[in-house]
Structure formats: C-alpha cells, structure tokens
Image (tube, rainbow, N blue to C red):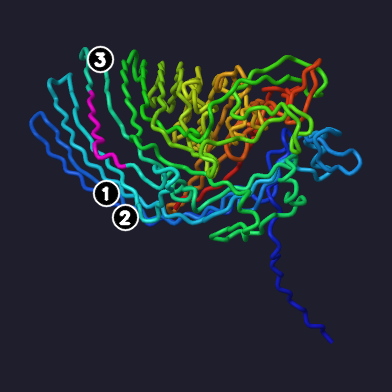
Amino acid sequence: MAVPRLWQCPVQDLRPPAPLTRVDNIIDGFGRSSILPRETRERRLHLAETLSLEGKRNSWKLGGDALLSRIYDFFPASFGGEYIFRPIRVNPYTFDPMVQGLELTSLRAYAHDVPHDYLQSFGRAVTHPNTNEYSSFLQDTVRITDHFVVSMGARYDLQTYSRKDMVSNPLWPDSGKVPYNPMDFAPRAGFAYSIGNSRPLVVRGGYGLFYTRIPQIYTSTVESQNGINNGTLLLSNTNYYDHLIFPKYPSILVNCAQLAAICTPPTSLKQFVKSDISAFAHNFRTPRVHQASLTLEREVADRLVVGLSYTYVHGENLIRARDANLPPPVNVSYPVYDASGTNVLGEYNVESFSTWQLTSSFTCPYPPCINPLARPISQLGAINVFDSAASSDYHGATLSVRRQMMSGVYFRLAYTFAHAIDDGQDALVAGRPATVQNSYAPSSERGPSVTDQRQRFVFSWIAEPKPFERSQQLLSAVFNDWKMSGVTTIGSGRPVNVMVSGDPNQDGNSGNDRLPGAGRNSHLGPDYATTDMRLTRELYAGDGLKIELIGESFNLFNRKNQLIQITQDGLQSDAVQFIQSSKRLGFVYYPAQYRVPANLLRATNTYAPRQMELALKFIY
C-alpha cells in the first residue's frame, strides 16, 4: 500500500533579524542593514511640447514641460538597532566594562560579546516628498555665413515641493520648511566656425548656465527629521548610566518589525533619546553650474580626425550639510600609537567640541575624562543645516584621434588631463547626512573632489575584416563576418580620505573625522587599467534567421587593480582608530589615544579579476 506523501508548508520565522553589527577595522557590518528594507513608489505625469520654426537664416525652437511626481517612500533607518565593537577596557574576570582594566581589541571585544556602543533610531518610516517641476526654453540658431553659426537661448526652471506633512519645530524655526526659488533663468550661447574649404579646421565653443534639481531624499529627510517625529538612542557601554540599560548582545532594545511604519521608544527610554533636525538654510538657493567648452577639430588625413578640447565647469550654491548645534571647539592633544598600542609615534592636536574633566567624580573616577557633548540647544541632537554654500571647479583638456569606419576598421583614442576640486558638497547618503568636520571652519573642506582623476587614457576599436570575396565561398564562410571590438582604459589614482573611527572631535558624528593635519581627500589611491574585448560571429541559417555567437572578456589581461575598501554606505573605510580609554605618557594622563594600523592607506581590496562570457543570440 502506498503511503501518501505529506506536504509541509514552510513556517515563517517571526523572530526579528539580528541587529547590525560592526567590528572596527575588521568588518563593516553584518546582520540587519541600517538602510534596508526600503520601498519607493512613484506616480509621475509628464507633459511636454516643442515647436520649431525655420526661417531663411534662423531656426527657432521653443517649448516647455511639466513633471508632477507623487511619491511614497518607506525607509525605517536603523530601526533594527546597531552594535559597534571598538577597543574597550573590561574587568579581566567578568568582562564587564570598566574605566581601568584589561583592554580588548575590537575583534576580541566581539568574541566576548562586549560592544562599545549601541544605536537605534525611532520615528516615522513613511514620507511623501512630492514635487512638481516646470521648465520652458527658447533658442535661436542663426547661420551668419556658410562657415559661421551662432546659437543663443535661455531656459527657465522651477521646482516646488509639497508642504502637506512638513512640521516646523519651535526650537529651530527653519525646520519643516522647503525652499522656493522662482528666479532660476539660465542663458545659453554657442558657436561653430569652420576655417578653409578643404578639410577645414572646425572651431566650436559654448557657454551655458544649468540649474540642478533637488533630489527628493533631501525633502524626505526634512519631513522626517524635524526633531518631533524622530529620535536616536546612542548608548555607550563605558558610561555608567548608559550601561544600566545597555542591552545584552545581540538582543534588540526595542523590537520594531522590519516593515513597521512607526517605531516608538517606551517612556522609560525617552530621556535617553535625542532628536536630530535636518533643515534647509533660510537663505537656501538652487545649486547651479556654469559650463564652458572650446573644441578644435580637423581631418588631417582621409577619415582621420584630430581634436583638442577644453572644458571648464564651475558649481555654485552646492549643497553642503553642517551641524549648527555645536559649541565652539577647543584644542586638545592626544598621543598616537602604532597598531600594537605600545609604541608612541607622536601627538595630534584636535579641535574638540567636548572639554576635559580634570577632577574626580562618580562618572569620572580616574581623570582626565572627556565630558559629554554640551549642545547649545540641549533639547536637540544634531541640527544638520543644508547650506547652499559649497562650490566646485573642474578643468579638463582632451586630445583625441578618431578614424572613421573605413575598410572595416574604426578606432578612437583620447587622453585627458583634468583636475577637480570642491568644498565637500554632499551627495546625501540615506539616513547618514555627511557634514563638514568642523562646522566653524567649513572652508577647510576645500580639496580634491572624490571624482578627481588627473590622467585618463581610453582606446576603443572595432574591426570587421572581410579578407575574401563572396565568390570564394569556403574561405569567406570561415574568415568573413567576424567582428572584433574592445576598449582599453588606463587612469591615474583617485583621492582617498584619511578617515578616523571613534569620533575624536566629539561632535556626535563618527563619519566626518579625518586624521589631524590631513586635508580632505589629500591622499592618492591606486591607479587603474583594464582591457575589455568582444568577439562576435554571424551565421545565416536562411528564412530570415540569423545566429550570432558572442564571446566577451572583461579585464582580459587579469590586471590586479587595487582599491581602498568602500563601506556599504559609500564612504571610505576607517584608516585610524580613536580609542577612549586612559593612557599614560610620561607623567601625563590622556583620556584617549589614536591607533594607526599597520596597513594605513594600503589597498585592502581589488576590482573584479578577469571574467569571460559566452552567449548565443537568435535574430529573426
């Protein structure tokens, strides 16, 4: 007798996922992501119209468009809790945190379940950053002579934002407000002039002013982070009062479902929760970019074109976040040790937003200690103000040689020498607004852009050899109808920021600290070179059916392209640790010290090795 098979439905695991765990200088994080899950739904209505009018020497164009966006954004940032393991001192027998005791490294602290910090965010996870965008333009192209053409025009842009769910906090009147800039007119001009009749030298130039749109992530952040709807709990295991409520790893202090629209702390924890504010500056202006270019191009031989171009781009009113709720900084010094923590390398002076306590107390039994951050508006945490105060400059010159397709061969090579600098404008990372290191000295952020690459060489080619006539059926069937193409890219290194973990300037932001004395993006990363190649063959199967065989290789020569590790939120990984545990140097005690790793700014990862792919495509 056959035994019927029992089908079992999988049982859903209702336990909350493990909280995010970070181990300094070991692993960036595992467990529940601080930026996931998230969901964005957009409904858009786009209306556009363009008219063209042709005259004897004039070509007119005018038009406009309207883009209406209705957005639902679900983003429970850090609702699941986050543990951070840093070096910490503990009782050598019980492994309980203590001011004086056995110092554990980050990895050993993780092995003994002794985290240094616990972080969890609360508030609403749903925002509606609706926006409307309107634009119109007018352009006239005038053919002055057969060799000279001039274009002139202007464009108008307006972006408006929904104020429906915006709430202003009385402690910061600029909160819960969105900008309105109705005077964004942008002129444009360009020309083309050819000198000579046979293989003329063609000169092209142009200038344009462009206004950029404000990404909805900024208005979404302003809506959710108004100091009323949100809050952040940050506990230090080394603080006596925080330790009393510090959860046991890997427990979550407040369990909030992954898809919860609201996460609210219990009343007993509200005294520990600080509310941050994100707000546009009251004088915020739309970011704009001036762009100018000049190109010289000439055909020097049959279908061989040489060009020289220069491009200048200047950005104004670029968005940059700074914390406006900080006291004036004071200068303090900390010793610097190597990775072992025993050999002294020197001292660093730091502009710190927290002072030192030099007398003994219940919370500071062994002075000196670092006092808690005393914010001017004590009821609030960080006030991240989105200033339109940053600027950028880009200069780039390119020499190119291009051979148009002839006898089945095409190639183009280009060499670019460029330089890009800026004041540290932000590309807002979801849930983690980047701020300047010292809000009292934002000009110190001036430095190479993250995209700055001084030299870049690109060579691309296509070859379609057909060495045999169709009359030579056997040879043409074997050697014809092949196509080879490829691109070789060689580039110099890009800037690297010397980051420090542990918040040495004590501003409550662990993502904006650099090595003292090091400018922003002041170090150079590894160079890069790769060759990608593609080989295809077409076969005709009759009745309109064509078969294409494809072989591709990426990084054909398997070059080891090194890189500095990039973390999950797009920031460079920490290079140096700032450890808050007392250290004696001679007769002087310090409440913290720096640790410089042995692999400071050395490549810790690589881009992809050689990859090969085979494909078969049917075309009918």
- Residue sitting at the far right: 93
- Mark-to-mark CA distance, 2 and 3: 46 Å
Circle on res. 200: 3
Which amino acid is tagged 1? Answer: Ala
Per the picture, the main secondary structure of the magenta-coloured stretch is strand
Residue in front for this viewpoint, 127 or 450: 127
Q: Position of residue 168 (x, y in %)?
A: 41, 49
- Asked whether residue 184 is drawn in magenta, I would say yes
Query: Which element type, helix, strand or loop, lies under badge 1?
Result: strand
Q: Position of residue 96 (x, y in %)?
A: 83, 43
Query: Which element type, helix, strand or loop, lies under badge 2?
Result: strand
What residue does disc 2 label?
Answer: 45
10 Å neighbourhood of mark 2: few (<14), some, or many (≥20)? few
Which amino acid is tagged 2? Answer: Leu
What residue does disc 1 label?
Answer: 66
> For this view, does 238 lie left or right of residue 446?
right
Residue lying at 21% horizontally and 33% vertically, measured from the top left = 154
